Amino acid sequence: MARTRQTTPQTKEERLRQKREAERRRYYRLKQDPVGREQLRQKEIAQYLRKKEKEVIKPIEDLSERDRRKRKQWREYSQKYRNKKRQIRMENERLVRRMHEDTPPLSEEERESLPTTPENHQRVSGKRRYATNKRRSRENKYKHELIKKLQLKVQKYKQRYHRLKNIKLNKNDPSSPRGRAIQILDEDKKIVEKKLLFAEVMSDQLKQNYEKINSTKQKQIFRNVTMIFIANYVQEKETTARETR
């Protein structure tokens, strides 16, 4: 006979039911062990004393007449309930003893066909829980790595967008060299030819004058004066462009 596989509970009620059953089994094992039973008793006593200190449990003399009647009634009901449970347990034990006396011992095949014990079920559940946690951990790790890669890509494309945006702004800005060059190219062809011719003439003239100088110090002075002239020219053009805007 094949063993039936117990599925993991899906609803909240099933999980609570299994939790209560596991707690009941744990409590039963503690009651069977003398050391565990004594520890449980000491724990209950300490819990009772703490409640008494916090006045959660009041002594009988501090209760009202109505609360005293309720406590007395509760004690009677509890006593009846415990007696009833004791009778049922004794009757079950009597039936089990009678069945053992009347029933022959089980064979090997019959023993193998018996359902799994709570210990075996707990071991199988633990293995299944470990495998599930391991799978979830692996999935979470993959998701975190994927999110990190996507964040890096987003940052890269943001930087690329800002660079392209700055390049576009520089093209449209007449105060920048690139913007002035584009603005010149957009003007009339004759004006562009004149400006290019002027630039070429100035460049050739500066080169010729520089080659005629023999002294190193005079060459350095010539370079400085030329740079100052170019800087003043650029500054004047930028000022004119701002005023026209």
Image (cartoon, helix red, strand yellow):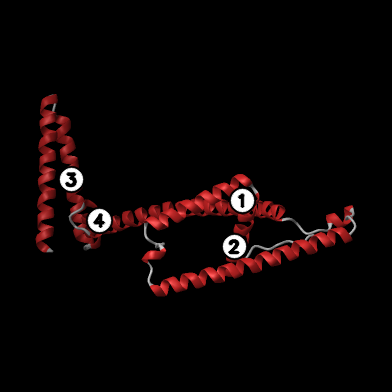
Question: Is the residue 207 above or below the residue 139 in the image?
Answer: above
Q: Nearer the viewer, mark 4 or mark 3?
A: 4
Amino acid found under the numbered disc labelled 3: Val
- Label 2 – label 4 distance at C-alpha: 73 Å
Q: Which residue is identified by label 1?
A: 30
Q: Quadrant of residue 115?
A: bottom right
**Badge 2 or badge 1: first in the primary sequence:** 2
The answer for how far apart the CA atoms under marks 4 and 1 are is 81 Å
Question: Looking at the picture, how far across and down is residue 23, in whole percent?
Answer: 59, 58
Q: Which mark is residue 201?
A: 3
To which residue does mark 2 refer?
20
Q: Amino acid at mark 4?
A: Asn
Marks 4 and 3, the one that precedes in the sequence = 4
Element marked by disc 2: helix
Q: Is residue 148 or residue 201 the one in the foreground?
A: 148
Please, what is the three-letter code of the amino acid marked with disc 1? Leu
Question: Which badge, 2 or 3, comes first in the chain's sequence?
Answer: 2
Disc 4 element: helix
Q: What's the distance in space between the residues labelled 2 and 1, CA to CA?
A: 15 Å
Asked if residue 187 is positioned above or below residue 45 in the image, the reply reads: below
Give how far across and how far down residue 47 sits, in percent. 46, 54
Instruction: Give yes or no for contact between labels 2 and 3 (Cβ–Cβ under 8 Å).
Output: no
**Is there any visible trace of residue 1 in the rendered image?**
no
Secondary structure beneath label 3: helix
Q: Is residue 118 visible?
A: yes
Distance Cα–Cα, label 2 vs label 3 = 99 Å
Labels 4 and 1: the sequence-earlier one: 1
Q: Nearer the viewer, residue 182 or 143?
A: 143
Q: Which label is found at residue 170?
A: 4
